[in-house]
Amino acid sequence: SEMGLDRKISVNGKQVLLNNEPLNEYTFQQNYYFMMGDNRHNSEDSRFWGYVPENHVVGKPIFIWMSYDGTANGFFNKIRWERLFTTVGGDGKPVSYLYYFLIGLVILIGFNFFRKRKKKA
């Protein structure tokens, strides 16, 4: 079934049949995409489960929130710091929002600290 249409493919000798009619050529009703994970040696992606129909694609990536190198030694060497919170795609060089995230995190922790301190008083 593709796009809700019943399609039964069978083989009769060397002839391929679509709904019991001989099939010499076929045009897909939608686009199909090859998806690959960013950890290509350990990803279960299109090499594992096949091409993805366009109507199964529900979004696009916006940014990389974590990038980890499993081959490096030491915890802090495994994190790819230059890729954390960077944009994906678009024109030009990727933009990092790591510093904005860290500033926001410090403000949030400080706000919670002073709020709890004020409640105790």
Image (cartoon, rainbow, N blue to C red):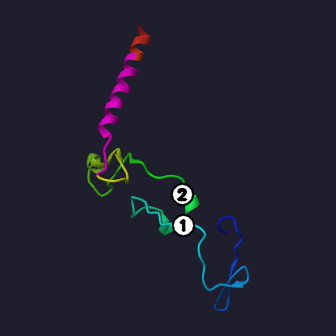
Q: Nearer the viewer, mark 2 or mark 1?
A: 1
Q: Main secondary structure of the magenta part?
A: helix
Most distant residue in the bottom direction: 13
Q: Residue at x 41, y 16 (%)?
A: 115
Give the quadrant of residue 3.
Answer: bottom right
Neighbourhood count class around disc 2 (C-alpha, 10 Å): few under 14, some 14–19, many 20 upward:
few
What count of labels does the image hold? 2
Direction from residue 97 to residue 55 in the image, left or right: right
Closest to the observer: 97 or 110?
A: 97
Locate the C terminus by quadrant: top left
Q: Which residue is label 1 attached to?
A: 31
Amino acid on which the number 2 mark rests in the picture: Val
| Segment tinted magenta in the rendering | 93-114
Direction from residue 120 to residue 72 in the image, left or right: left
Q: Which residue is label 2 attached to?
A: 57
Image height check: is 64 above or below 48?
above
Where is residue 44? Give x, y as percent. 48, 62
Direction from residue 59 to residue 67 in the image, left or right: left
How far is mark 2 from mark 1, CA to CA?
11 Å
Direction from residue 75 to residue 14 in the image, left or right: right
Instruction: Name the element at disc 2.
Output: loop
Amino acid on which the number 1 mark rests in the picture: Asn
